[in-house]
Amino acid sequence: MGLRSPWGPLETVERALTAVGAIILAWLAVSITVAVLSRHFAGEPIGWTFEIAEYSLVVITFAAIALVGREDGHVRMELLGEVLPQRVQRVLTLIAETISLLVLAAAFVAAVAITAENLADGTRVSGILRIPRWLVLAIMPVGLGLLAIEHGKRLARAVRPGSTGWAGSTGSAADPDTQG
């Protein structure tokens, strides 16, 4: 019996958020199709459909961002990294993960502040539905915070003694923290 990962609950949250994003994406496909058919056959579009689609794209993006980061599904340049010596790859990984973690931490703090400000002000988005803006923004600090944790985990792995390789070599299959 292997060791259980201390990150199990975090991974469960990431998978649940990604599932929510997938459900929203499926709903978007159906609702936009219905709106287009309504416009074509009835001459009347369903007005709120495209408004909800805009907000849903924000939710989908930030709901899945941490899982994509953990599973190494983001875009990166590997052309140079893979041919460099292991020691240089490790230094570049440390630099890249440190910068990523700092940027994500700053973005998280900003997202929390903006969401809280919109909640306190009672700001609503313009449009048909007039949804409270904080409802649209609330997923941003969640996704950014989870992604910052993922980059913190990568940084911790990169500073371990004996760690080698480019950041791209630390995907979930090679991640000892996700084995269990």
Image (tube, rainbow, N blue to C red):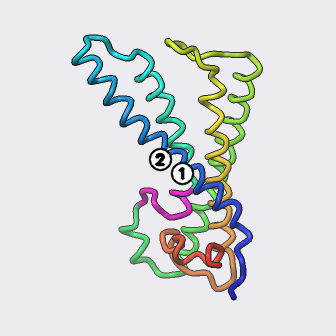
Residues at marks 2 and 1, CA–CA distance in whole angstroms? 6 Å
Q: Mark 2 points at which residue?
A: 22
Q: Three-letter amino acid code at disc 1?
A: Thr
Q: Quadrant of residue 32?
A: top left
In the image, 33: left or right of 131? left
Rendered residue at 61%/46% (across/down): 143
Rendered residue at 65%/79% (across/down): 180
Indicate the secondary structure of the residue bearing disc 2: helix
Q: Name the residue under label 1.
A: 18
Name, please, the residue furthest toward the left: 41
Rendered residue at 58%/54% (across/down): 66
- Residue 69 magenta: yes
Rendered residue at 54%/51% (across/down): 18
Q: In which quarter of the image is residue 179?
A: bottom right
Asked if labels 1 and 2 touch by Cβ distance under 8 angstroms, the answer is yes
Magenta highlight: main SS: loop
Name, please, the residue furthest toward the front: 42
Looking at the picture, does residue 38 appear above or below residue 60?
above
Q: Where is residue 170 in the image (x, y as percent from the top left)?
A: 54, 72
Q: Position of residue 49 (x, y in %)?
A: 42, 23
Q: Three-letter amino acid code at disc 2?
A: Ala
Q: Magenta segment range?
A: 67-76
Looking at the picture, does residue 167 appear above or below residue 50?
below
Indicate the secondary structure of the residue bearing disc 1: helix
